[in-house]
Image (tube, rainbow, N blue to C red):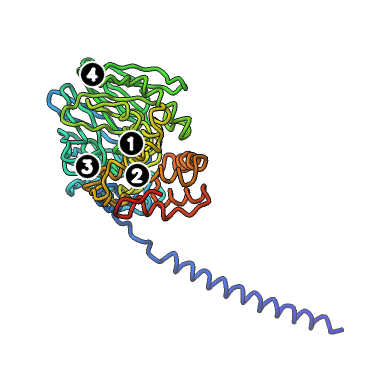
Amino acid sequence: MPAPGVITRVTRSRRTRTASRHLTSLAVAVVTTCLISAAPASAPTPGAPGVGDPYFPGLGNGGYDVAHYGLDISFNPSSGRLDGRATVTARAEQDLSAFDLDLQQLDVTSVTVSDHRAGFTRNGDELVVTPAQPLRAGHDFTVAVVYGGVPQPRTGPILSGSDYGWLRTSDGVLVAGEPDSASTWFPGSDHPSDKATFDLRITAPKALTAVSNGRLVSTTRHGATTTTHWRESKPMATYLATAAIGNFDVRTGRTPGGIPEYVAIDPSLPNTNGVDVYGLTAAVTDYWTSLFGPYPFEETGAIVDNVPQVSFSLELQTKPAYSHELYDTTVVHELAHQWFGDAVSVKQWKDIWLNEGFATYATWLWAEHQGTASAHESFLADYNSRPADAAFWQTKVTDPQRDTLFSSPVYHRGAMTLQVLRERIGDHAFFALLRTWYLTHRYGNANTAQFVSLAEKISGQRLDDLFSTWLDTPGRPQLG
């Protein structure tokens, strides 16, 4: 056995070498950490002025995601002036040195970011905001904009030259903002891919009624004016937000299925073509609930206003807006949008057939439900009414182009595609597909590729040939 002193020296020597190695490793780690810490962080940058939609590159904004809009607006029907304060709650998705809000025409008085005064400039339809301090990724912030002016409607080829957006009526206003005119009356991220909840407080002369999305929270009188507070608690695309101000006959209640209902009709309309708007809204809402899935929102209803300069209707969330040209099928179509278009919204405008094709097909389902025609019969009638050489068959439905966004093929060829799909995969799989599509993407966004993928998954079939033929191939498809 070795002497104790030798053992002691050997043990101490090993410990010394081990400690030395540990100290060396620690020193390297410390130096490395210091170097990493000393490396400069990426400098904050401005958010993009649009979300990259190929049809509307300036709509929406990059660098943040909106969670909520608090809109306080005051409207003077005599002058047409709107004064507003918009409080936008959002989360930064990058380190932001500046960011944009979409805002057309109106004058801005002040901007604050999280209660600190911010700089701002105008660049066309963009309000460029520079906060006092950069905004860090992952952090919530609020931006408050005080603004005002006389909003103007938009016009152009998108709606065949018809005005849309902020529409003056004989006694007030109706807002119908699809696709790019929400920013004519409030600042925000005006693209359906950035949905948010809303609180809307509308101040107007007390003789008038103010109607908006969601449910009525309160009505408060202040001398000659009344402030009406509406709340939409489910995410909503900006183009679906509305303010309808005027003389209305209002009826409230519940559908037979128990869903709250609010219907406002302008009494100056000579008639509504015999349509029982309240009764039909209740019946259709309940039927779509049984077929598509639970009603997505807190309230159903309608706004029927006398806007002589337009003849279109729009699926405003919870309360579709109807003009003087009102028919049963219009109500059926717009209420189907509450599921397909409002609850489930497009990621890009080129996929609009997911809204309009579905809502058009819903009118065929309603006729089938009423016993007037099967969906197959409606399909054949539509198909046979269009000659093989008609321009109708040349549109690529999944990419209809900006100025023909709402052209007939988007609606009718889209609906035909759904009927062909139904006959291919069978009723059980087809209606399971519609319900699953809605429940999977409710309150969010989706695109055509996702629908095709889900259809294949539920049916267990390859369906790319069907969708390619009926949506994207020029020429009238042959019936099997």
Under circle 2, the secondary element is: helix
Residue 201, given in percent of the width and then of the height, sits at 29, 27
Mark in front: 1 vs 2: 2
**Residue 62 left/right relative to 369:** left
**Residue 7 left/right relative to 90:** right
Q: Earlier in the sequence, mark 1 or mark 2?
A: 1
Residue 231, given in percent of the width and then of the height, sits at 36, 28
Q: Earlier in the sequence, mark 1 or mark 4?
A: 1
Residue 11, given in percent of the width and then of the height, sits at 74, 78
Q: Is residue 196 visible?
A: no
Q: What residue type is labelled 1?
A: Tyr
Mark in front: 1 vs 4: 4
Q: Which amino acid does label 3 sit on?
A: Leu
Determine whether 211 is above or below 90 in the image. above
Mark in front: 4 vs 2: 2
Q: Which residue is drawn at 25% across and 38% down?
A: 182
Residue that numbered label 2 is attached to: 414
Classify 10 Å Cα crowding around label 4: few (below 14), some (14-19), many (20 and above): few
Residue that numbered label 1 is attached to: 69
Q: What residue type is labelled 2?
A: Gly
Under circle 3, the secondary element is: loop
Q: Earlier in the sequence, mark 4 or mark 2?
A: 4
Q: Which of marks 2 and 3 is nearer the N terminus?
A: 3
Classify 10 Å Cα crowding around label 2: few (below 14), some (14-19), many (20 and above): many
Q: Earlier in the sequence, mark 4 or mark 3?
A: 3
Mark in front: 4 vs 3: 4
Residue that numbered label 3 is attached to: 103
Q: Which amino acid does label 4 sit on?
A: Asn
In front here: 7 or 96?
Answer: 96
Residue that numbered label 4 is attached to: 271
Asked whether disc 1 touches disc 4, contact meaning CB atoms under 8 Å apart, the reply is no
Q: Residue at x 49, y 51 (%)?
A: 456
